[in-house]
Image: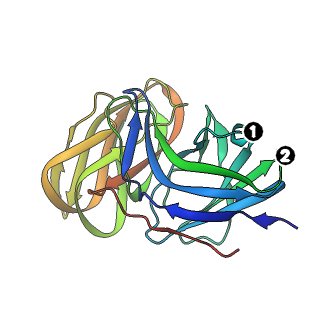
Amino acid sequence: MLQRVRMFLGTFLLLASAMGSAAVQKTTILQNRLQLPYGDSYWPISFTNNPVLQDLELAYVAAPGCEKVSYRIDYLPSGSSLWFAAVFQNGVYRTNGQAIQALRVWLNQRVRPNLLCDFKLQQVWNDGTTNPGVGSYAGLIEYKGGFALNQTITLPQPVTAQRLDVLIPDYCKNLEVLEVALVQQGKVSKARPVSQEGTSWIVNQATTFDQIQVTLNGPVGQQCQIPVYLKLDPAPVATPQNLEL
């Protein structure tokens, strides 16, 4: 029978610490000491505030045998009852960039019974200059190639924010974000980029809006799905807890 891992004195870091080089930033979502039974097991994780998570990896503190543990990740989107498998790509497990209510980390070890390992579940960022942090999922832009003026995301209700991220997928080459604007009842607030790649944008002060407009330019015929989310500052928004399956 498939077993849950046994957890010891969990240290929940609430998406607060970041590490890495300028090219790759890593944010620790949580860390815990796990006792892994021989064979297959799983680590259930749930979040109370549904953070936006995209590229994930499981790191371990060096200990004999822990380097031989294999894993994969499933995720449960906010408001859904269906689990999805995160896609392994470029060394990370990738979700579709939306708010997530729970994760299942499937583990396998063939070293010995009750192997003890300290694991960190991390979010990996590759935008080169900034850590996008964590925020509220705003919507998805369906880019169809070429110059695309004022691609609009309409929010279900007005929100107040100052910063947002336009996350260009790795497979979407030579695509530029030319302009980002926040709109409320016809009033347009232009944002300015705060990262060289144009992924992070900010307006002069916190603004209430119900639409986001993004102007893009790229190769004709290129098709990309581009998630946009609002940045929440400070970052800690998720409280992991055990999830009964």
Residue 151 percent coordinates (x, y): 36, 46
The circle on residue 110 is: 2
Up/down of 128 relative to 2, above or below: above
- Residue 46, image quadrant: bottom right
Q: Residue furthest right?
A: 1
Up/down of 95 relative to 131, above or below: below
Residue 137 percent coordinates (x, y): 41, 58
Within 10 Å of disc 2 (Cα), the crowding (few <14, some 14-19, many 20+) is some
- In the structure shown, which secondary structural element does the residue marked by tag 1 occupy? helix
The circle on residue 41 is: none
Question: What residue is shown with label 1?
Answer: 68
Residue 161 percent coordinates (x, y): 23, 59
The amino acid pointed to by label 1 is Lys
Image coloring type: rainbow
Residue depicted at x 79% and y 49%: 108
Within 10 Å of disc 1 (Cα), the crowding (few <14, some 14-19, many 20+) is few
**Residue 172 appears left or right of 151:** right
Tags 1 and 2 in contact by the CB under 8 Å rule? Answer: yes
Foreground of the two, 61 or 213? 61
The amino acid pointed to by label 2 is Arg
Residue depicted at x 55% and y 72%: 79
Residue 208 percent coordinates (x, y): 19, 64
**Residue 56 appears left or right of 233:** right
Q: Earlier along the polypeptide chain: callout 1 or callout 2?
A: 1
- Residue 21, image quadrant: top left
Q: Residue furthest bottom?
A: 244
- In the structure shown, which secondary structural element does the residue marked by tag 2 occupy? loop
Up/down of 78 relative to 118, above or below: below
Q: Is residue 101 visible?
A: no
Up/down of 100 relative to 188, above or below: below
Q: CA distance from mark 1 to mark 2?
A: 8 Å
